[in-house]
């Protein structure tokens, strides 16, 4: 169904302006090694390349427009593709002829780097053409290809570029002929899922089922032949492309069993959600219940047992991976920005399978917390890892926390996150509504206008709100088609009291899988929706051992955190009394405008003078204090300091 | 001062019997690859050799009595030396002609493996003679030598072997001539301290100051030339002897600054305490206040800021190292058995510098908790890592906890701990009392008899107790010398109420640096001492973030823990009410006899039926339960299960 969405929201337009005017030019400079910045290793590992990006230069060398060697990760190309994709989306909300010119040049360069038969990868073309597809567990060749297909579809749609589409089709055709179950084809998959998403997008654009078929092949083949990567590595016999990757277990690549038999979220978190995104897309497109069932099982496992309250996923730095149910350490986790971006992709595709608000709930949770936290307010510093508890001294001196940075770096050796975040925010218009065959879902409360004129429908929905500052949202619906429009407004899971009115008449809100369903007849109508957005405390399932005795505070979609700049150091000594009132206060001047939350609390202090590390209870006292919290996404924007989401609770009074 | 101590204590004699009759024969079989066992890697690392020990075979090959290659760590020899040292100590309390014969054969074999010039190391003699002393940061050549010197002194003293002493002197003379500041000497140190301890012991035995001088050289040289190891590695240019070791920071080896300028406990925990042990020995021997001051600073930092309540040290698996002050995670720490053994060595030497009971307190804490936990009650299974919180599923599925084993392995790829534990327990008689020039300290409450006849003194002290089951200790002192004996009995730091009587007359107990000082005149006297050994709660310095809201239970020297076999799974859901009574109950039949502690507690249960990971407070309830705790050292002796030392506390009632 063809429709377009225009965003008019202040909160998000600031971010979208940041992507357009700061991130895109900044990242372009970085990719061209023209930015005067420090590139940090994402963790303490000698093998991480962090001297420069070299990503554009790699293409120039592959295109024979420059001399030299490839530099960077074997998947360095994907940084360029994600930049192109993000740039394409920005053109849709702010046309920029100069940016289009630059993007066209990039497309021309990519095309020139493509080999005669359609193959496209600068590392192998420059350095090791003989090892093409010989070591798929590590090579990321199809991963990069998938990112190019995504960028190509986006750029073609945004700027009408034929060249980018031709290049993409040539690459996709090459892949479709090279991989499969036929004679002479490679029956294998890439170590990092992404080609599946790219092929599905090319299918959606072109309608050519070949691309969907090959996506389906990759999805169904994964895990059927668990020894594939090891066998390829042995046959290849050469130096690994990524040192140490072959030590990871099969789960790391979701290769431990056939995908349709997987029912838990395992391994590298980004890979798992990219896999799931493509799987859900295929399930929705084909109506295949078996595929949908697998998606639901993986979703349930993530959301019920392996997801942080911030929408972060990946409990360990080892393999940037999931671990086990209810294992959610707050200070050693990974919670990669990309993983939450991918979780949002997955959620969006699940909404195409079924209209259940939990997908949109998670989308919102990940978006307003982990994804936003991935970038500084200045749009030029980025987190890879998004902790729920950070202490600068521990990150500096405990090697087990070397990956938990407390200041956003300017760029990272593995630069997957910054452009991933940029492409999500730049395409946010695609997430607010889900236009299904018979209904329109409102997933996110973002001031915007949806225009749909297709298949006999002619609908305009204008959403107005100051969300999440306020929980009141107004919808002005113009239904010029003849049929009743089934509009479903998400009832956020955190709202316990909500009211609604249609054309100023109070309406009863009956939830249908978490949505308020309204039949909107032809004509112009006003719908008012109000959710209670008061600050609330949240507790973990008690099986999460790390959070016993602790509460997290959230207001609407925002999870809150305490920073030491507001609360003094040793945030673990803050005690939030169980009955303390939580007062919300808007602060226009702070952190580009945030609502802070204050509570009367206590601080545990040391009344022991002996210096003993272990002592009796009499040596501990508490004193009154005020606890100040800010939205999690805004942390680490006021210099290096401690941060904590889950606060220790205590009994007793806490009223002002 | 010459004296001897005989142990008559039931608790410890069981352990000493275990060492003599189980560990020594078992470890002998392992070292000879004659035991049908599974050798586990101490953590998930492909480079750890765990096919076999091969330690004796290495000596046979070096001695040209067998053919083959060296197998195992570059420091595999030290396993044999520590076995010999432990065997020697057992001969002092239980003579065994057959064991002596075996030990003599080992000495003969070691001597045959020694090179003409005194050099002794099977790895280099067999595999790379040309790299001798070329890569001291990794080679452990002097580390192994130190262990041989220790073993030689012990075996010479136990069995009068001249051959072992000759071999040791030849080795020590070779080292003293090879290393130093003179022309043609190597001005450098070993990556792993130990030679310093060995040389000091040889000095104490022989009185030859050359050995002390070279120990002093090694101690003072450390850290003066921080680039030494890296420079050697570059000059060597060959393959590393231990993969990845060169990535560790200088602190790992205590090479970051000259030892006398070090004031915090840094780096690999075992190395640090071995360094400190030798430093304290040298300080006491020479009366050098500067050396003693450095020892005190390092001690203060460990004990006040970096030591677990169990006497474990080393907060991270990365480099088996210290991290930073008050960083004491309970589930990812290292707390290596060897590190607590070394901490006891350090404490013992500190008591030679000054009679302050805190050294003995720590000695007792480490001994009764981490060291004892290092071995199973059967004497044939060993922990390397001693966690304060263990969940089998997390150890299995979270790679960040792969080192936290929940069942003691039969043997380990790096087998430093089992013989280290054996040599400590077998020489426990050397720790009970400290005989200083003018006073005798009673450090440990262990049924025993001390006989001292030297320098005009003729003293017998007989200690009788059922400690730690009971806090009452009796001393029968016979002072046949003319002078008043200054006897100092340690007042354990955990005792808040203590009484004493001398010859049945109640005495006032004035603590002098933590000791009850009694002037015992000539004749026979009886001293009764009683400490309150009721179970108590302990709290951490609030700067330890992991332990906020938690209490640990201890009774006398024993720290307690809860196991899931007694309490059900999810031990983090047990809540110990702040006012719950702690009832101690002796259980003769359990775990070779232990006192258990019971309390009325609560268990947090999940009252949420939605399956939501995050929810409001109403979804959490508690139910009454009984909490059962056992001494920490006895955990993991009843199959694989969860264990936890620090229990969550809660307000409210907890009385039966």
Image: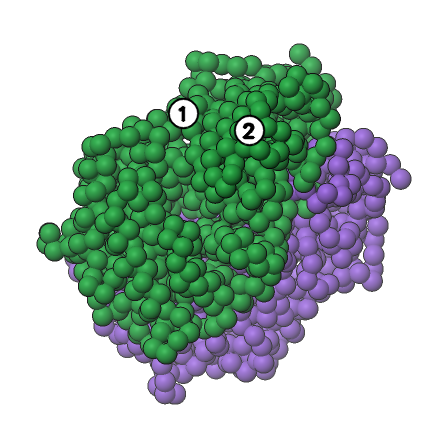
Chain colours: A green, B purple
Task: Using the rendered view, name the quadrant where residue B96 is placed.
Answer: bottom right
Q: Secondary structure at mark 2?
A: strand
Side (left or right) of B387 relative to A1:
right
Tell me the crowding category of disc 1: few under 14, some 14 to 19, or many 20 or more residues within 10 angstroms, Cα based.
Answer: some
Q: Does the rendering let one see residue B629?
A: yes
Side (left or right) of B35 relative to B166:
right
Q: Position of residue A445 (x, y in %)?
A: 54, 28
- Kindly indicate whether the residue at mark 1 contacts the one at mark 2 (C-beta within 8 angstroms): no
Side (left or right) of A401 relative to A74:
right
Q: Secondary structure at mark 1?
A: helix
The foreground one among A38 and A358 is A358
Q: Position of residue A462 (x, y in %)?
A: 51, 24
Task: Using the rendered view, name the quadrant where residue A599 is placed.
Answer: top right
Q: Residue at x 76, y 49 (%)?
A: B629
Q: Chain of mark 2?
A: A
Q: Chain of mark 1?
A: A
Q: Residue at x 56, y 63 (%)?
A: A260
Which is more N-terminal, label 1 or label 2? 1
The foreground one among B62 and B656 is B656
Q: Quadrant of the C terminus of chain B?
A: top right
Residue A424 circle label? none
Q: Position of residue B466 (x, y in %)?
A: 78, 53
Q: Position of residue A283 (x, y in %)?
A: 54, 56
Badge 2 is on which residue? A479
The foreground one among A458 and A315 is A458
Residue A13 circle label? 1
Extreme residue toward the bottom, this view: B66
Q: Residue at x 56, y 14 (%)?
A: A585
Identify whether B511 is placed above or below A252: above
């Amino acid at each position: 169904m063809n429709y377009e969405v225009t965003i008019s929201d202040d909160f998000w337009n600031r971010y979208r302006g940041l992507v357009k005017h700061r991130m895109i030019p900044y990242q372009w400079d970085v990719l061209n090694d023209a930015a005067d910045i420090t590139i940090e290793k994402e963790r303490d590992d000698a093998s991480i390349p962090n001297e420069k990006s070299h990503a554009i230069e790699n293409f120039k060398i592959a295109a024979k427009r420059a001399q030299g060697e490839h530099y960077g990760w074997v998947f360095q190309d994907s940084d360029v593709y994600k930049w192109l994709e993000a740039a394409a989306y920005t053109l849709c909300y702010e046309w920029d002829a100069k940016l289009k010119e630059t993007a066209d040049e990039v497309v021309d360069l990519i095309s020139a780097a493509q080999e005669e038969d359609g193959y496209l990868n600068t590392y192998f073309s420059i350095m090791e053409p003989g090892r093409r597809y010989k070591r798929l567990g590590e090579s990321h060749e199809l991963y990069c290809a998938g990112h190019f297909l995504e960028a190509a579809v986006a750029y073609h749609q945004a700027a009408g570029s034929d060249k980018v589409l031709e290049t993409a089709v040539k690459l996709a055709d090459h892949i479709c002929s090279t991989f499969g179950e036929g004679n002479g084809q490679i029956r294998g998959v890439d170590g990092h899922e992404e080609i599946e998403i790219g092929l599905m997008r090319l299918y959606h654009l072109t309608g050519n089922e070949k691309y969907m078929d090959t996506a389906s092949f990759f999805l169904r083949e994964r895990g059927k032949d668990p020894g594939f990567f090891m066998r390829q590595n042995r046959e290849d016999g050469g130096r690994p492309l990524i040192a140490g990757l072959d030590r990871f277990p099969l789960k790391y690549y979701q290769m431990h069993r056939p995908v349709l038999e997987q029912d838990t979220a395992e391994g590298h978190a980004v890979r798992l959600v990219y896999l799931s995104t493509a799987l859900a897309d295929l399930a929705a497109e084909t109506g295949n219940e078996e595929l949908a069932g697998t998606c639901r099982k993986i979703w349930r496992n993530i959301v019920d047992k392996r997801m942080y309250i911030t929408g972060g996923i990946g409990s360990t730095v080892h393999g940037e991976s999931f671990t086990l149910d209810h294992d959610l350490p707050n200070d050693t986790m990974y919670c990669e920005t990309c993983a939450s971006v991918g979780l949002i992709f997955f959620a969006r595709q699940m909404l195409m399978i079924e209209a259940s608000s939990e997908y949109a709930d998670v989308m919102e949770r990940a978006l307003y917390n982990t994804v936003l936290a991935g970038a500084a307010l200045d749009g030029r510093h980025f987190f890879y890892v998004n902790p729920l508890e950070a202490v600068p001294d521990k990150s500096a001196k405990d090697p087990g926390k070397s990956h938990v940075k407390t200041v956003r770096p300017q760029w990272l050796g593995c630069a997957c996150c910054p452009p991933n975040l940029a492409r999500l925010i730049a395409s946010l218009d695609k997430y607010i509504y889900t236009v299904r065959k018979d209904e329109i879902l409102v997933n996110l409360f973002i001031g915007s206008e949806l225009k749909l004129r297709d298949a006999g429908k002619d609908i305009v929905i204008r959403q107005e709100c100051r969300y999440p500052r306020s929980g009141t949202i107004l919808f002005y619906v113009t239904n010029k088609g003849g049929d009743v429009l089934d509009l479903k407004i998400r009832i956020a899971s955190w709202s316990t009291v909500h009211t609604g009115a249609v054309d100023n008449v109070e309406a009863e809100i009956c939830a249908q899988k978490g949505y308020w369903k309204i039949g909107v007849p032809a004509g112009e109508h006003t719908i008012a929706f109000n959710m209670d957005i008061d600050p609330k405390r949240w507790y973990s399932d008690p099986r999460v051992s790390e959070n016993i005795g602790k509460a997290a505070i959230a207001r609407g979609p925002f999870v809150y955190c305490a920073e030491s700049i507001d609360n003094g150091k040793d945030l673990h000594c803050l005690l939030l009394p169980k009955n303390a009132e939580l007062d919300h206060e808007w602060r226009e001047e702070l952190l580009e405008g945030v609502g802070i939350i204050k509570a009367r609390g206590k601080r545990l202090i040391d009344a022991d003078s002996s210096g003993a590390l272990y002592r009796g209870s009499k040596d501990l006292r508490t004193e009154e204090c005020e606890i100040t919290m800010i939205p999690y996404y805004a942390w680490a924007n006021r210099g290096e300091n401690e941060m904590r989401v889950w606060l220790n609770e205590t009994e007793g009074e806490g009223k002002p």
